[in-house]
Image (spheres, coloured by chain):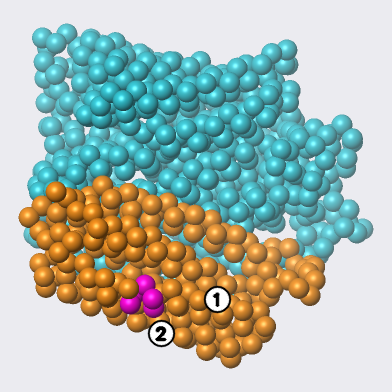
Chain colours: A cyan, B orange
Amino acid sequence: MKWDEFFVTGDPLIYGADVSIGLTVIGILFYLTYFKKWQWLWTEWLTTVDHKKLGIMYIASAVLMLFRGGVDALLMRVQLATPDSKFLDSQHYNEIFTTHGTIMIIFMAMPFLIGLINVVIPLQIGARDVAFPYLNAVSFWTFFIGAMLFNVSFVIGGSPSAGWTSYMPLAGNELSPGPGQNYYLLGLQIAGIGTLLTGINFLVTILKMRAPGMTLFRMPVFTWSALITMIIIVFAFPILTVALALMTFDRLFGAHFFTLQGAGMDMLWANLFWLWGHPEVYIVVLPAFGMFSEIISTFSRKTIFGYKAMIWAMIIIAGYSFMVWVHHFFTMGSGELVNSVFSITTMIIGIPTGIKIFNWLFTMYKGKISFTTPMLWSLGFIVNFVIGGVTGVMLAMAAADYQYHNTYFLVAHFHYVLIAGTVFACFAGLIFWFPKMFGYKLNERIGKWVFWVFNIGFNVCFIPQFILGLDGMPRRVYTYSAASGWGNLNMLSTVGGFLMGVAFLILVYNFYFSFRYSERENTGDSWGLGRTLEWSTTSAVPPHYNFAITPTVKSFDPLIQMKRDNVDLKPKIKDIKKIHMPDNSGVPFFMSAFFFIAGFGLVFEWFWMGIVGLIGVFITLIIRSFDPNEGYYVSEEEIKETERLTV
Amino acid sequence: MAHAEVHDHNTPLEYQSETGRLNILGFWIFLGAEIALFSTLFATYLVLMFRTADGPTPHELFELKGVLIETFLLLTSSFTCGIAIHEMRRRNRKGLFTWMIITLALGAGFLGYEIYEFVTYVHEGAALGTSAFWSGFFVIVGTHGLHVTMGIAWITLILIQVARRGLTPQTSAKVFISSLYWHFLDVVWIFIFTAVYLTGMVLHNG
């Protein structure tokens, strides 16, 4: 391979990106060196096993990926704003919609939610950390390096272009030659390891690490949603692992799983992909439901309406999430019986989801509602998500789907579900728990601007797409003719897209503004309305051991109970005992570096490099296994000092 | 992370530490994920079962003798692995080592036969790229074989740790977890024996 094939060349946009990536890297290196921050970066962040810090790193990476995926989206919208546009060529457009979809789902939505779960769940159940803190670091680093590997494709070797669904035979060697599709396979495979480990980790954490008195049916709804999500992850992600591995065998080693030659079966990929892919939709939406439940209940000053119904609805949704996958390809020859069955299971999922919507509404009924920004996002969610849900039921009807399939109607539908569900939840959750992470709130006034600009932009962007879809505009086309008459609505949609971009910039400005000017919190209950244990810590940002004394839970909404009973949350000196905590470790960081080497080697089919990387991974595993890793004790003096307790 | 450990005399060593208990539960969940992984491979294999294209059919190449020997070796190794755990619970380190090493030797024998079988098939014109069927065959049986290989390496490393540090709640939890893994591979093999070999020899297209 020649150097000019190795690097992506010939496009001014890419050169611009090369320069900006280079400058950013130099800027970061300079900052770290000039301000002597290397040591700080290494000990406080890169080697940490603290669930709160890992959560913050997840969220920071996800915001970065939101930017990347968002720029992809805007490039597409610019191309589609006018008919017969020459802004992007077809190959470039294909690459952009592929990376947009993949990044938004795998590297933005999931890590954002997993980040919030990381920060909040151990605090919500009154635990000192997760069950396997070291494994948690491995999860983060494999996700991070998988994301980086996928993003490198942008400047080295070329991006995948077969869509985020990567249907065969399009994604095979014949129609997608070169390393692009391999980046997709290896990037997702490495990140998938991290997700599976997160699933196991939080399942054990929630089942085994709850504070005394917190029975399963006293768990907060968000904890329940995380528990159910982790079960879905444990059973869905291995399917993706296998599907990706089989396609890797097809592409790298000449196997015939999904190829047209050798009696392979291309539809097998579609089935395996969606057998993972549909549960994946619920992996990114159930935690969102959980967060909205917390926020709506908190700012309505009422306990959640229909708690048990909420839980059972999520359990039923989780079960059905594995029984609807064919609705993604009704038109691809499944036959009327199969289509009917999957049509019905799909519509059934609407019932528990509807129950949840009504429960949120009844929670607000007669509540004393505070319209804070997290609450605004939650209200925006209810309205917009219902549009996504109703159009979903329309699509669920197999016969009608023949009309909607592969049109912009579908595109608009799933953006209403994923943006109004997941992205709104990410924003709402981030703002709600921001003081827990950093000790100050995001500015509410600017936050309201973000909400309104984003919401208006979102609807202006996607409502025209429903109409375009019904008018027959297919998805994944890079341009259309002026005669089609789709120009005006597309231009309107593009304007909406840019409004969302503006909202994102205001959000970033809010990060800066609030860092500079926000009042610092001095209680653990920043909103003054906290209902669950994460708000019961004495300091705004919990110390690394979370709770000086493990709380005891007597009811659902434990903090409300404690407030009613006038419980003094400040720990008593006589109760302070030394606390056992896990050691930091640099091994996960190095393991992920070796994963990167292995993945990069396999992408270019340099097998020696792949083997070197994998050997490195095994060495890090062995080093960890032989390390006695006994952890350390936080002394009573240190705890007293942290908690500001004096005799 | 709790430290004040309360347990009666009958609690097995591997369950005596909080870390041990958490690790064992975590590993059971991991095995749940492994079941999902192998189920996907089985589904794939069964879908591709008759898709031999121009290549040989399983009916032509499968031989019962080698497969039976493999099965016998692996099933026996699961039994000896069980005895090893029994010896560990009796705090008999020597017994643990003896039976675990026998287990690993049987596992290595299984692997030897499997590699021989693979090489034979390749010589007879059936490789990974021959047809969809053979892709499915090599990947499902190969994935199991890879698991056995990893199991042998892993258990060896754990035995070295036991030799160095003795039987502690930590090391015994590791031994116990690796034994769960070993039994799991045995269960998967029973399904491979049935779904791949017996089915392949009995059912054939046309």
- Numbered disc total: 2
Q: Which residues are drawn in magenta?
A: B69-73
Q: Check disc 2 and report the residue beneath it.
A: B105
Q: Which mark is residue B82?
A: 1
| Quarter the C terminus of chain A occupies | bottom right
Q: Residues within 10 Å of mark 2 (few under 14, many from 20)?
A: some
Q: Amino acid at mark 2?
A: Ala
Of residues B177 and A106, the one nearer the viewer is: B177
- Chain letter for the residue marked with disc 1 in the picture: B
Residue A349 horizontal side relative to residue A167, left or right: right
Of residues A282 and A26, the one nearer the viewer is: A282
Q: Judge whether residue A609 is colored magenta.
A: no
Q: Position of residue A631 (x, y in %)?
A: 65, 70
Q: Secondary structure at mark 2?
A: helix
Q: Residues within 10 Å of mark 1 (few under 14, many from 20)?
A: many
Name which of mark 1 and mark 2 comes first in the sequence: 1
A52 versus A597 height, above or below: above
Distance (Cα) linking label 1 and label 2: 15 Å
B140 versus A532 height, above or below: below
Q: Quadrant of residue B168?
A: bottom right
Residue A555 horizontal side relative to residue A341, left or right: right
Residue B150 horizontal side relative to residue B197, left or right: right
| Quarter the N terminus of chain A occupies | bottom left
